Image (spheres, helix red, strand yellow):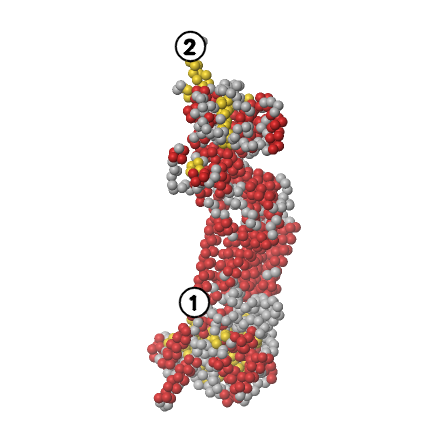
Amino acid sequence: MSKRVPAVLGWREPLRARDLLAVLAFALVVLATVPAFARTFADEAWQQPVLSAALVAGAVVVTLRALRLPGVVALPVTAAAALATTSALLLPDGGWWPSAERREALVELWRVGAFELEVTPAPAPSLEGLVLLTGVGLVLVTVLGLELLLRWRRPGLALTAVAALWTVPLAVPMSAETAVGTRALVFLASGALLLLVAPTDERPDPPAVTSPAALSTGVAMAAGAVALGVVFPGLLPGADQPPWVQLGSGSEPRGYQPIVDVSQRLRAPEDRDLLRVLAPRRTYLRLAGLDSFDGATWRLGPEAGGSFEPDPERLYAAVDLLPPEQPAAVTEPLAVEVEVLELENIYVPTPYQPTQVLGPEREDMVWSTQGGFLATWDVVEGRLRGGPRVGVREGVSYRIQAARPTPTRDDLAQVSVDPDTLEVLTRLPREYPTLAAQAEQVYAEAGATSTIDRVLALQDWFVRSDAGFTYDLDVPPMRGEEALERFVFEDRVGYCESYATAMAVMLRATGIPARVAVGFLPGRVTREPGPDGATATGDGAGPPPPDPGGEVAAGGEDAAGGDPEFTEYTVSTADAHAWVEVLFPGYGWITFEPTPRDDQTQIVPRADDLAPWDNEAERIQAEREQAADAELDSGADGADGPDLTDLLSDEDRDAAAGSDGEPGAASGRLTGRTTGVALGLLLLLGLGVAALATVRRRARGTGSRWTAPADGSHDRSPGVLRAQERLLRTAEGLGMGRRPAETLEEVLERWRSQCRLRATRPGDLGRLVTLTQRAAFGGACTAGDLVDAERISGTLRADLASSVPARTRMLAPLRRALSPVLRRRREQVPEWAHGQARAEPVRSRTAALN
Amino acid sequence: MSAEPGIAGVPTRRAPARPIPSGPPAAAPDPDLGHVAEVLGAIERNVASVVAGKPEAVHLVLVTLIAEGHLLIEDVPGVGKTLLARALGRSIDCTVARVQFTPDLLPSDVTGVTVYSPDTGRFDFRPGPVFANIVLGDEINRAGPKTQSALLEAMEERTVTVDGTTRDLDRPFMVVATQNPIELEGTYPLPEAQRDRFLMRLSIGYPSHDDELAILRTHGSGDLVAELRPVTDAASVARAIVAVRQVHVAEPIERYLIALCRATRAHPDAELGASPRAALGLLRAARAGAAMAGRSFVVPDDVKALAPHVLPHRLILRPEAELAGLSPRDVVADVLDGVPAPVG
């Protein structure tokens, strides 16, 4: 410990040219992390504030060090400077002087950033929160790294800190459902363990070059990480995620990732309830319509790329009546009340298309007629300002009046789209000739000529069983140039994302304006309508009854108390969904459903009813009943969907869900997570043991130093022994380690006979033996001895390394890290060598002598 | 090198005996290693001038000397056992006695007798050869057990009891006994108890071709040993012994040493392992070895270098191991190869 003190107080030494060179190198390494982050951001707006914040913070550190300020002074100053820099450069309207207001803004933005991190898939726009998180990370690492470099002179550790920056971009697309904590824990633990196992590059008093140790630390960490990744690929951050970098392909296709990652919700290891909905009938809850397709991902807004800024002209505060996104001539009013159980989101789940939001939450909501989404927004004094914020969260509840477009097939048959709109809404990143041909073939087979017939034909083609499309969550994300074609023509296995994407692309390829919408299925019935249920909903919180005019009378918010018409639905993660919307000017965006979900909870529009209420399960049930009724008594009215049907269908659904592979898959994932947790705990345990061992070793070292004679303060024996230790560990990594019974002299003799020691001078081996023997068993060592020992140890290590094949050399850090295990396996000390006396007594020799 | 006939039991030279202070002085952290090196270097060169090509044997003899041990040289006749012992005695200006052990040798021939002196009218004690600083016991296994055990007491206790009177021996005191491992007929092999009292057993071995040639040329012309001049005296050797006692032994070395001895006891081929006396002997030998290497502290290499000479003659192998052709030396080598050595 006491050896560390001069290192900490390194501020007394002037900065040398070598230090400045190191700072430059460090700056380069930090800059090298920019590409990693660039993958996670869709635009470049984040770079300038983040890099300048890191630059300023780093400059402060270097300046303080150059001024030779001691750590006690430099640390607070650095912290203050980092805070001021963050506030000035990363806050939207920040200043250099930190005030309470800015602090609050910082905290709030940090929180927003955390949410954005969770809900925004990569590549993300340069949202302020994300930029703040990135900037703070970069500033912290820069400050830490430079301190390690300039004050402690531990370049290896400084590099490790920078390496942490690389893991951050890897964690960006992961949300809470994917056990990112567990994975991060595993990696943190393994990294820390390796750091402990790897030798510390102790700085000897006359500074020696420490780079070999730094390098081997890095190599050991990398090797350990690779080994871990190979053995447990599921633990890797980004496992099962589409790659960010795909070599050999410029277009970089990705799996379909809408604003809310449907696939992640669907694949959550266990179902969680997100929303509780009171509604008269089943209805899709929509988050947003995604207008542009880049070949892999459907995005909100025009396809200009980069961050999506909704057109302010098309934003409307939700306190007023909401203008329709598209005028709809034929609508049906619908009122729902939504209580958020667990969802955290910017976008508000709503039936399409909403006309009015009720409840206090509407103060903070905004309606965009571009993409047709309702979002929570920063609203100050009634004016829209700033940007989106995560307003949908646990405990929030709101009521929505919506006007559901319910045109008939005949209404839509005559519709035509103006060329400008058509051009925008049929834009595709490339030609899809085979898909277009397939679509045309489907149309032709169905004899469909009008747009609506064509859309229905295509939808039926997907849903119809004889096309061979099956629903399965356990499919790899769509990757590669021809992924969509492969899905449609070869695999035909997927889930809502694949189906919606395929159908929308096929529609666009055949000149029909379509887009993908994301949101939730209606959910399962958790309370039946009726007097009991209504009473149980409590203080008259039931939504108002449907108003034929589509408007709510004043005080209508309270008018619906105890209405027995409302069913309570619970929406869970399993209900996350994506579907297709097709624009029919004058009638609005009409929902279509290409996904053949095997639990039959989707609502499929049909030619005779383009906006049905029943989901497929109910419809099939009703058809079955109808058929049965028709057989018995054609006069019965079975298609009305009595309450009983809901119950039955739910049971059916559950049974269906139980029979498909879903719960099994979920339990598999659960097992994977348990393994991850166990592994993490194991590594933590190992970490603890290693730390304990280190502490004890240090304590012992300190103890012996204290008991040393008066001049023990100048004794460099521990340093000499460390040099020896490093040498032996290197040799062990190279497969020439000391056998337990060998003394150093014998080891060196062996090396001399086996290896070509080029750089080691003739007297060096003897000198090293003398020094280490003195350090270990005899008297004190001087600083000169330490320098000698370091030098000889260094040249010997180099000699040893150069006398083995390159392959052995590459594997050396790994072997060294694993040496405690390997050594125990390889060189068993015989039991008798421990001196355990035998159980049997010594036999009398009298007989033998005679 | 011809065996001198009969009983030669009279001390040839006699120097005043100086007692050696026992135990290290209270505050003497640094042993006078320069003195040790000087004295022993001189003896080593002197002895080596007549014992050709056996530097290791000479070294071990000197280690035994300053470790206050006794030496058993066991080898076939004619390889220079007696020569080595005589050369050592000649090199130090001290009393040297030589006893040729024969079956009819009596204990009093070794320890001395009380005789009536008509001049004084009293019984005078006439000291035997054991009262010399260096005692050469040639062919010790040819004497009867009674005589052997007379020497035993002297070796271990460094006292001699004759007619009920116990007399202290001079210091330094070292017995160099030789033994012929063949021609066992009519001999009394040293029992284990007695072998244990020798610090080392050493065999000299045949010289190399060139050395043998050199022996022919040098020794053909006369008795070289008789021409050797003493290079140091008993007092200097005694000082060296004191210095050796102060050589530092670190705890890991002590543990290593004990581990070695315990391992011989646990070794599957050993019936009887090294005793605690063996551990003590190894420690003394290691100290002496370190001092001769000019070190004020013992290192594992000292222990490893000396254990093959200090331990084997104290081990008894299991009959099956003996039948398999193993020797105690093999067991010790095995132990040295198995017990982890400390490096720091």
Q: How far apart are marks 1 and 2 (CA)?
A: 113 Å
Q: Residue B121 carries which label?
A: 2
Residue type, label 1: Ser
Q: Nearer the viewer, residue B94 or A443?
A: B94
Q: In which quarter of the image is the N terminus of chain B?
A: top right
Residue type, label 2: Gly
On screen, residue A300 above or below B104: below
Position of A227 compared to B147: left or right?
right
Res A638 quadrant in image? bottom left
Instruction: Please rate how many residues cluster around mark 1, counting C-alpha atoms within 10 Å: few if below 14, some from 14 to 19, many from 20.
Output: few
Q: Which of A636 and A825 is in front in this view?
A: A825
Q: Name the residue under label 1.
A: A667
Name the residue located 43 percent from the left edge and 25 percent from the top edge. B144
Give the foreground label among 1 and 2.
2
Label 2: chain letter: B
Position of A604 compared to A310: left or right?
left
Task: Check chain identity for marks 1 and 2: say if they share one.
Answer: no
Q: What element carries label 1?
A: helix
Res A136 quadrant in image? bottom right
Disc 1, disc 2: CB below 8 Å?
no
Name the residue located 48 percent from the left edge and 81 percent from the top edge. A466
Label 1: chain letter: A
Q: Which of A692 and A454 is in front in this view?
A: A454
Q: Residue A622 carries which label?
A: none
Q: Which of B161 and A260 is in front in this view?
A: B161
On screen, residue A67 above or below B247: below
